[in-house]
Structure formats: C-alpha cells, structure tokens
C-alpha cells in the first residue's frame, strides 16, 4: 500500500510539472487569446522600427511636437516655390509688398504742370515726361521734351520727390543742343522758394524749335 501510494504521488507530481513547464517555442498565435498581450506586458523599447509594418502608422499615432524642422522642401504651402523650408518662412510676406507706383505724367490731371513753354515730344515714339518713386525711395525721371526755354524750370516735383532740402542735384542729359550733345539738368530740393522748390530745369545750352531734351535715366534719392 505504501509503495502504491508513493508511486501514485510521484506520477501525479510528474504530470503537474509537465503541465506547467511548456516546451520552448510551443506557444504560437493560435494559443494566444484576442487582446491577451496588453501594454503593461510589453517591456519598454520592446517594439522597434523593424517590428513596425511599412506605412502602418499615421499622423494620429505621431506626436508632431517631437518632429524637427524640415531641412529642405521643393514646395511649401506659403510659397509657390521654395528651395528650402527656411526660405519659405519669409515667402509669405511677398504678397504684402505693394506694387511700385505708376508713372506720374507731367501735364496730366492732378499732376505737376509744364512750365516755360516745355511740352512732350510730338513723335509717337517719344516717351512723355514723367516720374515715379520706387520702393527704396529713389525717384526716376524719363521723357523727351521740346520747345522750352533753357535755364528755366521745366516742371516742379512735389514734396517727397525732391533731393535733400537746400541742395541741388545735377545730371548730364542728352539733347539736340546748339553746338553740343549733352547738357546739365538740375533738380532742386525743398527750402528755397515756393516757385522753385522741386524745380527740374535745363541749366545750359539752347534748343532750336522742335529739337529735344531727354530726361531718360535721371534718378536720385528722395530726401525732402
């Protein structure tokens, strides 16, 4: 009886041991219940990049705040084209830059008037006398004019389009002057007299009737 009981105990112990000790690699997907492996069962860092399926993660699973800046981009939402993302940060301001102003045509409604018999050239190819100020504050003149009185004002620039107060700016200009092909055109700043402030004048030489003076290419910084 003692021997029989001892044998029974040993047999039962062996079966229990075998039941709780599983052979290596014997547990597969079929043996795991649905949702059996929970988050707390996974060790930190257990799931690596090689274990993640390609294109299985979306923006929902990613914390955008942990992403660094994009170093280069061929296109950005705020710019039609951008070579780098850094450059694209300033591209948005380009739409807020005002277009350059239109030419002010001397003699037109609301614009300065011709003085001392000066007038625009009569040929269709002649640019009318005009001026404008660019974004940098530089004033540009243009135009072919005729029949004026030398050493007298052609027209007066308005305030904000003149050289420094109390100063003259002198520029060579092409002309059909008697005995010469160039002359001097002076542009006067503010602070002289109401009839001469901002005056643009031909300073020397003389023109026969129908001969021209060109103000093309004259430019200067507006300071008064």
Image (spheres, rainbow, N blue to C red):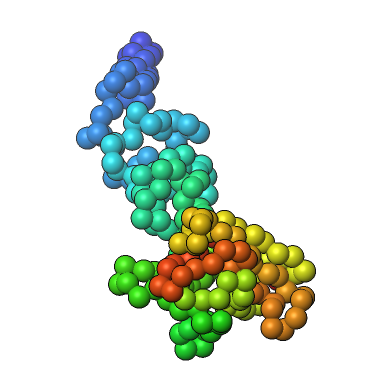
Q: Residue furthest bottom?
A: 109
Residue at (50% x, 46% y) in the render:
86
Q: Quadrant of the C terminus?
A: bottom right
Count every numbered label the image shows and give the total. 0
Residue at (47% x, 76% y) in the render:
147
Position of 202 with respect to 101 (left or right) is right
Q: Is residue 72 above or below residue 110?
A: above
| Rendering quarter of residue 15 | top left
Residue at (36% x, 44% y) in the render:
74
| Front position in the image: 224 or 180 | 180
Q: Is there any visible trace of residue 144 in the rendered image?
A: no
Residue at (62% x, 66% y) in the render:
203
Q: Residue furthest left?
A: 30
Q: Position of residue 35 (x, y in %)?
A: 33, 45
| Rendering quarter of residue 83 | top left
Q: Position of residue 170 (x, y in %)?
A: 64, 60
| Front position in the image: 182 or 23 | 182
| Front position in the image: 53 or 101 | 101
| Front position in the image: 53 or 133 | 133
Q: Is residue 66 above or below residue 30?
A: below
Q: Is there any visible trace of residue 189 in the rendered image?
A: yes
């Amino acid at each position: 009886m003692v021997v029989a009981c001892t044998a029974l105990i040993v047999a039962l112990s062996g079966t229990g041991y075998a039941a709780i000790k599983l052979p290596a690699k014997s547990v597969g997907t079929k043996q795991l219940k649905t949702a059996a492996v929970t988050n707390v069962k996974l060790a930190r860092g257990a799931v690596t990049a090689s274990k993640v399926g390609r294109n299985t993660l979306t923006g929902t699973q990613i914390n955008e705040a942990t992403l660094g800046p994009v170093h280069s981009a061929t296109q950005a939402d705020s710019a039609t084209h951008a070579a780098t993302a850094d450059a694209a940060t300033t591209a948005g301001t380009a739409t807020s830059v005002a277009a350059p102003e239109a030419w002010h045509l001397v003699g037109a409604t609301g614009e300065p008037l011709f003085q001392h018999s000066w007038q625009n050239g009569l040929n269709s190819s002649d640019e009318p006398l005009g001026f404008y100020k660019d974004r940098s504050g530089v004033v540009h003149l243009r135009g072919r004019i005729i029949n004026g009185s030398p050493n007298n004002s052609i027209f007066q620039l308005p305030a904000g389009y003149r050289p420094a107060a109390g100063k003259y700016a002198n520029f060579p200009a092409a002309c059909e002057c008697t005995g010469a092909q160039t002359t001097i055109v002076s542009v006067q700043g503010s602070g002289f007299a109401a009839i001469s402030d901002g005056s643009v004048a031909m300073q020397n030489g003389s023109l026969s009737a129908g001969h021209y003076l060109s103000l093309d290419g004259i430019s200067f910084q507006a300071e008064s």
